[in-house]
Image: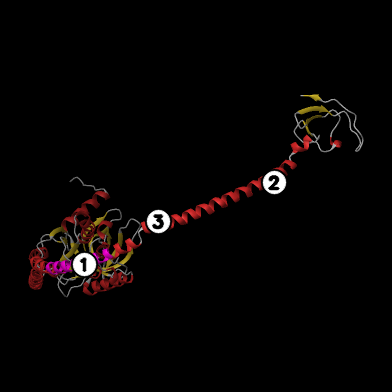
C-alpha cells in the first residue's frame, strides 16, 4: 500500500497559489466594482463582478498612487493583474497592478469630471499663465529618451535656436510608472539644471496611451513647476489636462520646440534689416555732417585769422592816422590852454597880493592883541571877586574867627549836644591845629559852660 502524502492546509494553499500564478500569467480583466473599501493603510479592496460571477480584488498603495479619480461602486473598470490565492481565507483574489475606466466613454467621463474639479479650484486660470523667455539659453525637456518626440524636439531646437543648451530628463510617458516619474521630473529638473522653460511632451496615441497626462498628480505638478511649462502631448486633435494647466499648449512636440524658441533665421533677417537701416542712417548722417563741414569750412575761410588780420591792419592804419591828427589838434589846444593858464597865474601871483595880505595881517594881529588884553583883564577881575567869595565861605576863615569843629572818634561831625554822652572823646579842630577832649557833662542851651583845659595833641 502506497504511503499517503498529507498536506497541511497552509501547505496546500501555497501549492494552489503556485499553480495559479504559474499557469495564469498577468492578464486583463473587465468588470464592475462593488464593495469598494479604502482603509487607513491606503490599500484598495473591492469585488470585481459581472452578471455571472465575481472575484475579490486588491490594489495596494504603491500601485494605486496617482490613479484619479478613485473608483467607486458601480464603475466599470479595466484591470491588469495577477490571479492568486489569499491563503488566510482560501479565496481566489486578483492582485491589481493597473486600473483604468473601461471603454473610451468611461475615460472621457473621468476626464471631464477631473477637468471640472480642477477648473473649479482655479488651476487652469489664465491669470496663472507665465510668459515664456524671449531667448532662452537653457531649455528643459521631459519626455521618453527613446521616442520620436525627443528626436523631433532636438532637431527643431538645433535648427531654430542652436544657442540654447537642452537638458533632457527622461521619463516613461505611458503606463503606471509614468505619472510618478513625470511628477518627479517636474519637481527635480528646475532644481538640478538652470533651465528657463520646460517642454513636457510625448508622441501621439490613443486616449489610454495619453492618460498619464490626465492624472491629477501630473496636472498639479505642471502648475506647481517653478519654471514656465509648455505641453506638447500627442497630435493637434489631442487634449490632456496637462495642456490646460501648462503655461502654453502646443499641438505637437515639434510645435512645442518652436513655441519656446525664436527662429534664428528670422533673427538673422531682422539683424540684416537693422544693419541696412544702420548703414542708411549712417550714410545720411555722414551726408549731413559733410554738408555741415562744408558750411563750417566756408565760414572758416571767411573768418580765417589771416583775413581778419588784414582787416585789423587796415583798421590800425586808419586809427593811426586819426590818432596822429587828434594828437596834433590836442597839442595845439594844449598850447593855447597853457598860455591862458600862464596869464591867469600871472594875474593871480602871490607876489602881487602879498603886500595887501601883509597889511591885513598886521591889522588883524593888532586887533587880536587888544582883544586878548581886554579878555585877560576881565578874567582877572572875575577871579579876584571869586577868590573873595571863596575866602568868605571857607571853613578856615570861620575857624580863624574863634570857631571850632568837633568830630567823634569815627569822624562824624558833632552838631547836637544831646547826641553826646558824658565820656565821649571828641577831636576839636581849631584855626591852627587839633586837640582832643572828653565830654564831662551837658549844659542847657544858652547856659554858660564851665571852663575846661583841653589836652593838646
Circles 3 and 2: CB distance less than 8 Å?
no
Nearer mark to the viewer, of 3 and 2 = 3
Instruction: Kindly report the secondary structure that dominates the magenta region of the rendered protein.
Output: helix
Rendered residue at 23%/75% (across/down): 105
Rendered residue at 24%/73% (across/down): 108
Residue indicated by mark 2: 385
Nearer-N-terminus badge (3/2):
3
| Place of residue 28 in the rendered image (x, y in percent of width and height, measured from the top left) | 19, 65
Nearer-N-terminus badge (1/2):
1
Name the disc covering residue 332, or none.
Answer: 1
For the C terminus, give its image quadrant: top right
**SS at circle 1:** helix
Nearer-N-terminus badge (1/3):
1
Magenta extent: 316-339
Left or right: residue 227 compared with residue 274: right
Crowding around mark 3 (Cα neighbors within 10 Å: few <14, some 14 to 19, many 20+) is: few
In three-dimensional space, the C-alpha distance between marks 1 and 2, rounded to whole angstroms, equals 76 Å
Color encoding of the figure: secondary structure
Residue 398 among magenta residues: no
Up-down relation of residue 18 to residue 254 (above or below): above
| Place of residue 258 in the rendered image (x, y in percent of width and height, measured from the top left) | 13, 69
Up-down relation of residue 342 to residue 442 (above or below): below
- Which quadrant of the view contains residue 96? bottom left
The residue nearer to you, when weighing 327 against 94, is 327
In three-dimensional space, the C-alpha distance between marks 1 and 3, rounded to whole angstroms, equals 34 Å
Rendered residue at 79%/27% (across/down): 436
Name the disc covering residue 354, or none.
Answer: 3
Amino acid at each position: 500500500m502506497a504511503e499517503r502524502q498529507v498536506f497541511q492546509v497552509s501547505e496546500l494553499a501555497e501549492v494552489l497559489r503556485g499553480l495559479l500564478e504559474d499557469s495564469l500569467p498577468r492578464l486583463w480583466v473587465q468588470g464592475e466594482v462593488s464593495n469598494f473599501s479604502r482603509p487607513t493603510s491606503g490599500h484598495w479592496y473591492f469585488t470585481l463582478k459581472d452578471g455571472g460571477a465575481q472575484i475579490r480584488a486588491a490594489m495596494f498603495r504603491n500601485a494605486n498612487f496617482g490613479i484619479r479619480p478613485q473608483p467607486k461602486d458601480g464603475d466599470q473598470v479595466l484591470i491588469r493583474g495577477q490571479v492568486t490565492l489569499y491563503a488566510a481565507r482560501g479565496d481566489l483574489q486578483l492582485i491589481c497592478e493597473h486600473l483604468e475606466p473601461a471603454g473610451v466613454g468611461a475615460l472621457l467621463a473621468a476626464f471631464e469630471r477631473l477637468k471640472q474639479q480642477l477648473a473649479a479650484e482655479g488651476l487652469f486660470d489664465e491669470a496663472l499663465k507665465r510668459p515664456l523667455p524671449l531667448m532662452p539659453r537653457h531649455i528643459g525637456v521631459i519626455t521618453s529618451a527613446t521616442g520620436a518626440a525627443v528626436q523631433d524636439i532636438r532637431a527643431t531646437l538645433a535648427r531654430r535656436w542652436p544657442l540654447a543648451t537642452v537638458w533632457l530628463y527622461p521619463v516613461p510617458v505611458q503606463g503606471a510608472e509614468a505619472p510618478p516619474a513625470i511628477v518627479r521630473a517636474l519637481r527635480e529638473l528646475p532644481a538640478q539644471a538652470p533651465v528657463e522653460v520646460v517642454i513636457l511632451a510625448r508622441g501621439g496615441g490613443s486616449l489610454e496611451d495619453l492618460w498619464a497626462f490626465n492624472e491629477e498628480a501630473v496636472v498639479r505638478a505642471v502648475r506647481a513647476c517653478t519654471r514656465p511649462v509648455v505641453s506638447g502631448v500627442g497630435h493637434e486633435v489631442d487634449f490632456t489636462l496637462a495642456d490646460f494647466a501648462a503655461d502654453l499648449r502646443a499641438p505637437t512636440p515639434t510645435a512645442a520646440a518652436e513655441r519656446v524658441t525664436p527662429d534664428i533665421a528670422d533673427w538673422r533677417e531682422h539683424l540684416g534689416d537693422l544693419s541696412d537701416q544702420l548703414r542708411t542712417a549712417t550714410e545720411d548722417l555722414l551726408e549731413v555732417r559733410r554738408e555741415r563741414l562744408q558750411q563750417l569750412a566756408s565760414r572758416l575761410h571767411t573768418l580765417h585769422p589771416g583775413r581778419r588780420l588784414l582787416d585789423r591792419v587796415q583798421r590800425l592804419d586808419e586809427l593811426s592816422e586819426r590818432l596822429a591828427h587828434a594828437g596834433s589838434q590836442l597839442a595845439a589846444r594844449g598850447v593855447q590852454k597853457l598860455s591862458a593858464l600862464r596869464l591867469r597865474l600871472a594875474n593871480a601871483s602871490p607876489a602881487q597880493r602879498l603886500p595887501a595880505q601883509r597889511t591885513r595881517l598886521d591889522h588883524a594881529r593888532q586887533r587880536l592883541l587888544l582883544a586878548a588884553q581886554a579878555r585877560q583883564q576881565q578874567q582877572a577881575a572875575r577871579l579876584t571877586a571869586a577868590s573873595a567869595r571863596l575866602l568868605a565861605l571857607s571853613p578856615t576863615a570861620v575857624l580863624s574867627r574863634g570857631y571850632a569843629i568837633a568830630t567823634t572818634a569815627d569822624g562824624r561831625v558833632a552838631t547836637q549836644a544831646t547826641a553826646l554822652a558824658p565820656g565821649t572823646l571828641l577831636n576839636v579842630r581849631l584855626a591852627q591845629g587839633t586837640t582832643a577832649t572828653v565830654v564831662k557833662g551837658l549844659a542847657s542851651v544858652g547856659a554858660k559852660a564851665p571852663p575846661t583845659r583841653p589836652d593838646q595833641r
